[in-house]
Image: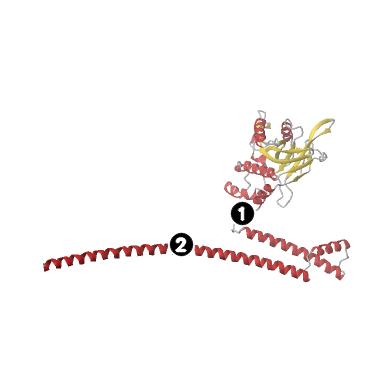
């Protein structure tokens, strides 16, 4: 990677700062870069592809192969190292002595000058910083970030702007060109500022600094959710968990097989004895639980019976609950049937009493008529 010797120091930083970076910052930079790139789809069409095919395949190539941000800028802004469409922002966090913890970040827009130069919009930066201080009073401005391959004079000019709000701001740069999909290293470099004598004059240069990535519990859950892509086959979480367990067991089996093969070759005389390695293998075997003996069988059977008893009690409890629900339903149905029977019997009794009264009246009327005829 070509580095501008007038901007980056030849030696890394030796200040002894302990810099910690949280994943939220990395996600914010990646999201901002992706949104900025997708806003300029027509400026980076590869040869032999149309715009429709490029848009369809852009999302698949975005992570593994990222083109230059400078190709997305207006013509008048190219060639100066940074442009209106570039990605920059501020880093905020906590600094305690020599320990710096970068927790969050926010975007900062760029503005072009009359002479074609590009600078950060400091009015927006001050306004956004005041808003963050109202919500997160413990977070201070620690530095700024940008995208590219290496620091440029344009980055140094913006760094001088940021130095007005922090005496020694950090500079984090995310590489967006020549990415290697097989690399396990993050495309991030953190720089500190140092003053070096070049040509008899003092110059402010960028010096590479060491950093580490640290995650909290909430960030770990978010990163795992982002890292694990949604399975189109509809597998459940249980299947995913079992697949992970299977891979872990397979790896353990392969390593144990390698140790066994080594011991067999040592026993046969094919390989020389390494006493240090043999002691490590012996220590590893001593950590394994004893699989034979009366004590082991007694404890194993006791635990096994406890598990079976708990399973049996759970089954009995579940069956009793289902039986109780069935009895309640039967009681409800029986109560409704008894109520209907009572109503039916009451109505039939009323009808019988009415018919008896009517027949008595008819008999009395016939008796009176017979008595009158005899008279």
**Measured Cα–Cα span from mark 1 to mark 2:** 48 Å
Q: Quadrant of residue 352?
A: bottom left
Q: Residue furthest front?
A: 375
Q: Position of residue 297 (x, y in %)?
A: 75, 70
**Picture layout, residue 143 above or below residue 220:** above
Q: Quadrant of residue 157?
A: top right
Q: Position of residue 249 (x, y in %)?
A: 72, 63
SS for callout 1: loop
**Picture layout, residue 242 above or below residue 148:** below
- Tell me which residue sits at (63%, 50%) in the image: 60
Q: Nearer the viewer, residue 90 or 317?
A: 317
Colour scheme in use: secondary structure
Q: Position of residue 39 (x, y in %)?
A: 60, 41
**Picture layout, residue 84 above or below residue 47:** above
Q: Nearer the viewer, residue 325 or 202?
A: 325
- Tell me which residue sits at (48%, 63%) in the image: 329
Question: Which quadrant is the C terminus positioned in?
Answer: bottom left
Q: Which residue is mark 1?
A: 230
Q: Which residue is mark 2?
A: 332
Q: Quadrant of residue 13?
A: top right
SS for callout 2: helix
Mark 2 crowd level (few <14, some 14–19, many ≥20, 10 Å Cα): few
Residue 53: tell me if it is visible: yes
Q: Earlier in the sequence, mark 1 or mark 2?
A: 1
Q: Nearer the viewer, residue 345 or 332?
A: 345
Residue 87: tell me if it is visible: no
């Amino acid at each position: 990677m070509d580095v501008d010797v007038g901007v980056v120091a030849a030696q890394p930083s030796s200040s002894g700062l302990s810099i910690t970076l949280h994943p939220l910052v990395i996600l914010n930079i990646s999201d901002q870069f992706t949104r900025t790139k997708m806003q300029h789809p027509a400026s980076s069409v590869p040869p032999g592809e149309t715009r429709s095919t490029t848009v369809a395949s852009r999302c698949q190539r975005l992570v593994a192969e990222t083109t230059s941000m400078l190709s997305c800028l207006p013509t008048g802004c190219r060639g100066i190292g940074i442009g209106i469409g570039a990605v920059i922002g501020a880093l905020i966090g906590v600094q305690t002595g020599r320990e710096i913890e970068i927790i969050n970040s926010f975007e900062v827009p760029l503005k072009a000058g009359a002479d074609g130069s590009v600078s950060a919009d400091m009015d927006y930066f001050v306004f956004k910083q005041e808003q963050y201080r109202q919500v997160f009073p413990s977070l201070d401005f620690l530095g700024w970030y940008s995208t590219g391959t290496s620091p440029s004079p344009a980055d140094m000019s913006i760094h001088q702007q940021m130095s007005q709000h922090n005496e020694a701001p950090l500079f984090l740069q995310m590489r967006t060109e020549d990415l290697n999909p097989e690399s396990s290293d993050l495309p991030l470099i953190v720089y500190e500022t140092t003053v070096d004598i070049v040509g008899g004059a003092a110059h402010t240069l960028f010096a590479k600094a060491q950093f580490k990535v640290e995650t909290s519990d909430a960030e770990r859950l978010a990163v795992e959710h982002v890292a694990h892509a949604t399975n189109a086959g509809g597998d459940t979480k249980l299947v995913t968990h079992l697949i992970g367990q299977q891979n872990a067991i397979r790896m353990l089996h392969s390593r144990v097989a390698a140790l066994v093969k080594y011991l067999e070759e040592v026993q046969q005389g094919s390989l020389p004895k390494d006493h240090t390695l043999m002691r490590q293998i012996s220590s590893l075997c001593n950590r394994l639980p004893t699989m034979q003996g009366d004590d082991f069988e007694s404890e194993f059977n006791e635990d096994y019976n406890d598990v079976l008893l708990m399973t049996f009690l759970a089954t009995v409890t579940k069956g009793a609950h289902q039986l109780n629900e069935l009895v309640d339903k039967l009681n409800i149905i029986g109560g409704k049937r008894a109520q209907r029977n009572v109503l039916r019997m009451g109505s039939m009794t009323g009808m019988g009493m009415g018919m008896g009264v009517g027949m008595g009246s008819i008999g009395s009327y016939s008796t009176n008529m017979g008595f009158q005829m005899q008279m």
